[in-house]
Image (tube, rainbow, N blue to C red):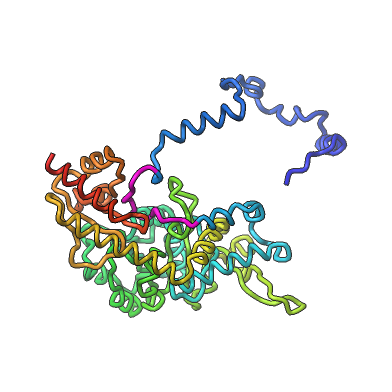
Amino acid sequence: MFTPHTQKDVEVMLTSLGIEKIEDLFSVIPEKFRYPALNLPEQLTEMEAAADLESIASANGSTKELLSFLGAGAYDHYIPAAVDNLLQRGEWYTAYTPYQPEVSQGTLQAIFEFQSLICQLTGMAVCNASHYDGATAAAEAAILADSHFRGKRKKFLVSRAVNPQYRAVMRTYFRPHDDIQILGDDQETGIDADMAKFIGLIDKDTALVLVQYPDFFGRVIDYKALIDAAHAHGALVAVATNPTALALLTPPGELGADIVIGEGQPLGMPLSYGGPYLGYFAVTEDLLRKISGRLVGQTTDMDGNLAYVLTLTAREQHIRRGKATSNICSNQGLMTLAATIYMTVLGKEGFKEVANLCYQKAHFAADQLNQVDGYQLAFADTPFFHEFVVKSERPVAEVLEWLREHDILGGYDLGQDYPELENHLMLAVTEKISREDIEFLTAVLEEEYHD
């Protein structure tokens, strides 16, 4: 809260600074730059300003008007009304990082519940209070591994089937470290589901192996052999996951993962042009003191009442900077609350139902598109969750343009990131997509092919 200074306060401050008036503070700025003439439009009333903004916003397409099969890391799920209704309460909107537990019990409990839910979902022992997004969480996993091995292992293996944005952010983080190698996501190693070439790269110098589950193409791959190979060489394994898929799939913790990270956007967050989102981050108990970001714990106060506190804060950068594994500190608190409300409102069975609807509808869509002339299902021998890839005989850019003319966001052009997958289109199907929507997509593609 901002409290205006009284005239007496101002005079005391000016006297202590040895100046007579506030304007003297800006004397070092050339006079011609102090009060520049601003080319501002004429003032508007509130009603006029609102109308202008609504006009600008209406020029953008949204999933309210367009049929969306876009995915690639951000998904158009149905968000129950209770999420926004509770999220917009003033006490949540104004809450800040809860340094003082005596006045932050509500915020701390909400974060604790989020951590608990993510641990149940991933099968891990400990979860932090989130990072900015999935890509940030992936980079932080690499930082944790580097700290765990005290910089002695210089090799980080990242599957080519990991989200390209995650891989790019990780490289950005490590750009100043010339001695660290990020390998495994080259075209030669490839994206084969058996991952034989990728597994062959693991050795005693490997600090971290990062894979995605389901992978970027939506495929569900059994990573047990990879995890066993990594552990045999003493490396840590991080698994980037889609939280919705974990309602049906074996949790990565049960597969032996050391770190589980992911993008929490599917848990009650709108697409919002890319954010704000949240990156969840969970680890085994052995890595508890290495995990970055906030940790909230449950305890009792001096009167024996249930209480929540920030715990193990000595490992954070604002307490013992030299001992911290990372400089990241803030969390997406409002987004963790949205995820917590979403998962709580749906409940265990409701969450499974959402995941099952995504799975069933995606497979129906894949079967329908596979029957359209000029389109063929790629990776047909590998199971998938709610994202799949089709190969087109026509350039994907032309296909997407045709679909957009029919108010359809037709998917993701994989050729942008994978030259070997030119003319491959990736589509995502969520519970919001109906059978009629899929049949309309199919009909438009059939019309385009025969046009």
Q: Is 431 placed left or right of 420 in the picture?
A: right
Residue 231: percent from the left, percent from the top? 35, 78
Q: Is 199 colored magenta in this rendering?
A: no
Q: How many marks?
A: 0
* Between 264 and 129, the one nearer to me in the picture: 264
Q: Is 103 placed left or right of 184 in the picture?
A: right
Residue 270: percent from the left, percent from the top? 46, 51
Name the residue located 19 percent from the left edge and 54 percent from the top edge.
369
Give the residue furthest to the front. 436
User: The magenta stretch spans which residues?
Assistant: 65-80
* Between 100 and 158, the one nearer to me in the picture: 100
* Between 5 and 387, the one nearer to me in the picture: 387
43 lies above or below 244: above
Q: What kind of secondary structure does the magenta stretch mostly adopt? A: loop
* Between 178 and 348, the one nearer to me in the picture: 348
Q: Quadrant of the C terminus?
A: top left
| Quarter holding residue 362 | bottom left
166 lies above or below 2: below
Residue 197: percent from the left, percent from the top? 22, 68
Q: Is 75 colored magenta in this rendering?
A: yes
Q: Is residue 74 visible?
A: no
Q: Is residue 222 visible?
A: yes
| Quarter holding residue 9 | top right
90 lies above or below 65: below
Name the residue located 44 percent from the left edge and 75 percent from the top edge.
123
Residue 366: percent from the left, percent from the top? 22, 58
Name the residue located 29 percent from the left edge and 68 percent from the top edge.
220
